[in-house]
Each structure stands twice: as C-alpha cells, then as structure tokens.
Image: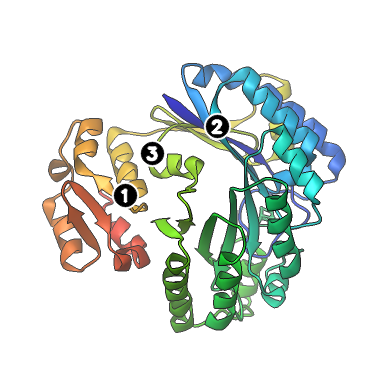
Amino acid sequence: MTVGVYIHIPFCESHCYYCAFYSAVERADVYDTYLDALLREMEARAEDIAAATVDSIYLGGGTPSLFGPERIGELLAACRRFFTVSADCEVTMEANPASLSVDDYRRYCHGGVNRLSLGVQSFSDRHLQRAGRLHTAHEARQAVQRAYRAGLTNISIDLMYGLPAQSSASFQHSLLTAVHLPVSHISVYGLTVEEGTYFGRLQQQGRLQLPSETEEWRMYQDMCRILPHYGFDRYEIANFARNGKRSRHNQKYWHYMPYLGLGAAATSFLGRQRRTNIADWKQYVAGTARYSSPYETETLTEEQLAEEYVFMHLRTRKGVDTVAFARRFGISFCDFYPPSVAAGLQAEGLLTQIGSTLRLTPRGMALANRVMAKFILT
Ligand code: SF4
C-alpha cells in the first residue's frame, strides 16, 4: 500500500486578503521550536503508516520555503528515517515568489525537494497588490525561471480569477504569461470570499467590488480555452498538467487514498478515520512536548465514505468507476444511489457515462457544486 504525507508549516510573512488557511505571522526564531515538534509528531505517528510506502510528501502551509533549505532538508531526512519512502517519491514544497536565488532553490533540491508549488495568483501587479500579496509579477516570473535553472523541472503555479477589479483581459494575460513559462502544472481557483478574512470584512462593509458574474464566467471560459491550447490537460476541476506531470499527492485526495497529516491544522485520512490536529501552532508544540497535541477525530460511516468517494472521484476527469465503487463498498452504485440521480444529471448534460464510468461533462465541471449536491444522501 502507498500513502501520502502532508506536513503543515503555518508561517507566512503576512496574511493575504483572501486566505482562510491556518497561518501565523511569526519571527523566524520560533521555526526551530516548530521543527522539533514536527519531528516529535513524526516519530510518534510513524507506526500509523508502518506497513505502507510513502510515495508523496507535500510541504504545505503557510509558506514552507520560509523554513529555509536546512530545516526542510532536516525534515525530509527525518521522513526517510521514520517512514519507508519510495525512491521516486514526489516531494512538493509550496513557496511564495520572493527573493530566493538559484542557489537557494538548488539547496532545497539537494535536501530532497523535487517539485515546487508557487503561489503566483496573478501576473498583474495591480491585482497582486489588491489581494495583499507581497511579490510582484516580475518576481513571480523570475521565481519560476530561477527554480527551473536550479533543476526543478516539475513546477506548479497557482492562479486566481474573480479577484477585485479583475477583468477577463487581465486574467487572459496571467494565463498567457503562465503557459510561456517552464511550468508543468497550473492550479486555477475562483475567489471565494471567506468569513474571517480581510476580503470577508470588506464584503460585510459593502466595500468589496468583485467582477460581475458575466465577467467571471468569461474568465472561467478563458481558462478552459487557453490552458488546453497550450498543452495543459485538465485532469481535475481546477488542475491542469503538461507532459503528464499531474500532482501525485493531490491525486491521493481525489482518488480517496490514505494520507498522514503532520503539524498544526493538518488532517490525516487513514482507514475510516479522519483526524485533524489543533489549528494553533503554540498549542501544537506544547502538546507534542507532552504526549500528543490536541486533535479531533471523526470516524466515517460506510455511507459517508461512499459519498465522499463519489464526490472526490467526480472532481477528476477519470470520474467514478461504478465497478470499482461496488468492489470497494460491497454494494452496486445503482443500489446505493437511486438510478434517477445519475439519469437526471445526464439528461441535463452535466454528467456522462462511458462504460461503467460516470464523469462530469465540461458543463458539469462548471456547475460541479450543483452536481455534488445531488449525490448527498444524508
Ligand atoms: S495565501 Fe499562502 S502566503 Fe498568503 S496567507 Fe495564505 S498561506 Fe500565507
């Protein structure tokens, strides 16, 4: 059995205006304390995945690159010490386009990183500034080129659409800039305004000016048109890969495979248990110094597992194989869901069936939430 390992490094230089992930702005002198806690948790939980081979490690955040090449190297060396790590393990590190040099990227590679995920979001300085990002478009382009020169040939970037005052023309510029850079993977997210963020507060005060629905729809269509034209294959609702460089780690989530999550706010999914560590790095550190940090667990029922399996698979271009579903859950898809659910969605042109597989159509991908809602039984 293979398993993924997710390690959360929650530190950021500042809070971006849209971000609802757990992150903290702290001085660098707390990083060693947090690293020690991660190592303690890793050792304590190695047993949970002792029978499995780790074939993907994802350093997410936060901004893991703030940890620096030495700490990242130490963390990855510990993974190899405590877990069985495959020789071809995908090791992704998230980073922000900042002032990292070619040599810095080389040192991350030397420590074991072989895939980079850069939070670019836009190639327009105006929109970057309005989203509270600290880097410029020039720095983002430079970061990709430097990382590539350092030998990181598997680079992913994140882009956003629906940002305040963003137009289809500006988003097209970001897409076209991205495809002409040496990146192999692009994740594209529509802005969701979340409570507790700066954008959320602006919206409550009626001061957040977002693009109209028509303009946002144009941006969505730009994404669907431009990325495949430049060789990016849409293998998940929001993810596009060139030259087959799909994210092995993220596919674990969508294909409903097991993963171990380490660090504050990290989630694990092993067997039928989902466990989430406390989203407070100080309490997390204090907990690992005793027996264990506070965490919450949820044991999923067979019905919940089956529903989530369907949602996650439907996000991918591969879709849900109803034969594999029946094998895993011991019940046929037609007995689990009334046949009218899939038939109704097919009649609306949102779902298609090829052999035993159900997949979202391009229109279904655009209206994915509506489709998923139909597959909720509970
Ligand atoms: S978007 Fe990334 S860099 Fe910005 S606050 Fe969130 S985790 Fe930190």
What amino acid does circle 2 point to?
A: Cys
Categorize mark 2 by other alpha carbons within 10 Å: few (<14), some (14-19), many (20+).
some
Residue located at (17% from left, 43% from top):
333
Mark 3: secondary structure: loop
- Measured from the top left, where is residue 372 in percent x and y? 31, 56
Q: Residues within 10 Å of mark 3 (few under 14, many from 20)?
A: some
Left-right relation of 277 to 65 = left
Report the amino acid beneath label 3: Tyr
345 with respect to 42 (left or right): left
Q: Nearer the viewer, residue 55 or 228?
A: 228
- Residue 360 appearing in the image: yes
- For label 1, count other residues whose C-alpha is less than 10 Å away and answer few (under 14), some (14-19) or many (20+): some
Quadrant containing the N terminus is top left
Spot occupied by residue 229 in the image (x, y as percentages of width and height): 44, 69
353 versus 203 height, above or below: above
In the image, which is nearer the foreground, mark 3 or mark 1? 1
Please report the residue visible at 70 percent of the width from the left and 29 percent of the height from the top.
Answer: 75
**3 or 2: mark nearer the eye:** 2
Q: Secondary structure at mark 2?
A: strand
Displayed-image quarter of ligand 1: bottom right
Residue 330 placed where, x, y %?
19, 30
Disc 3 designates what residue?
256
Q: Which residue, given by chain and number where applicable, does mark 1 sit on? A: 318
Can residue 260 be seen in this snapshot? no
Q: Is the CB–ligand 1 distance for label 1 below 8 Å?
A: no
Residue that label 2 marks: 89
User: Is residue 344 found left or right of 293 in the rendered image?
Assistant: left
User: In the structure shown, which secondary structural element does the residue marked by tag 1 occupy?
Assistant: loop
